[in-house]
Amino acid sequence: MDSFWGNIFKRQDQQDTYTLLKKVPLFEAMNPREMDAVERIMHRREYRAGEVVFRQGEPGVGMYVVQHGLVEIIYEPSGEVLAELRDGDFFGEIALLNETPRSATAKTTTASTLWGLFQPDLLDLLERDPRLGVKLMVPLAQIAGRRLIRADAQMQEMREELAHYEAQKKPGRIDIQDERSI
């Protein structure tokens, strides 16, 4: 419990934001002064249930951190839900590195509060405070690298499954699909 003499000028939502952001790997190594600088360039937005945060194919311009609520990451046009994100989760961080089209749609499933960090603000921060910018970019590169390694491993698994499937198909064996064409 804070003492009576604690920082009476610090708003509760600032404390909540600080606590939230410190849980995100991108920000966890930052000291309070650095976190204040990052908080100043982040944008808070309230979303209604069912509202689209961004659509697959749109240019990526930033990342989001879920403060409260649920967000689904959906692959279009199949509608397959790739992930369901909750309080403290983050998504879209690759857009901080480049503006490639979004690979999926992000849509809220409940009323949600999200914090956005956008590439133009990050680039401005890099220019103003290169040391802090590097402190953000290194974990961002590490996150991107881990996701790339995981995607590569998944691709290898799919290649092996396909090779196994191909090996199971023996010459002269009639497949159900082949039978339909007879």
Image (cartoon, grey):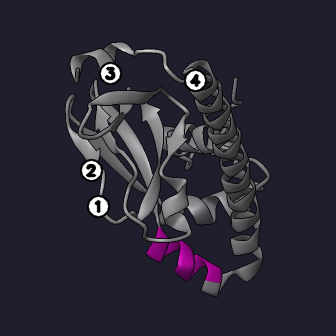
Residues at discs 2 and 1 in contact (Cβ within 8 Å): yes
Q: CA distance from mark 4 to mark 1?
A: 36 Å
Q: Position of residue 66 (x, y in %)?
A: 46, 37
- Residue behind mark 3: 178
Residue at the spot 43% in from the left edge and 67% down from the top edge: 100
Q: Is disc 2 in contact with disc 3, using a CB cutoff of under 8 Å?
A: no
Query: What residue is shown with label 4?
Result: 165
Q: Examine the residues drawn in magenta and state their main secondary structure.
A: helix
CA gap between label 2 and label 1 equals 6 Å
Dot 2 lies on which element?
loop
Q: Amino acid at mark 2?
A: Arg
Q: Which amino acid, mark 4?
A: Tyr
Q: State the separation of the CA atoms marked 4 and 3.
A: 16 Å
Reading the image, the residue beneath label 1 is 58
Please, what secondary structure does the residue beneath circle 4 have? helix
Which image quadrant for residue 108? Answer: top left
Q: Is residue 182 above or below residue 90?
A: above
Type of amino acid under label 3: Asp
Numbered range of the magenta stretch: 119-126
Task: Determine if residue 5 is in view.
Answer: no
Q: Earlier in the sequence, mark 2 or mark 3?
A: 2
Q: Which numbered disc, 2 or 4, marks the residue that appears first in the sequence?
A: 2
| Spatial CA span between label 2 and label 4 | 34 Å
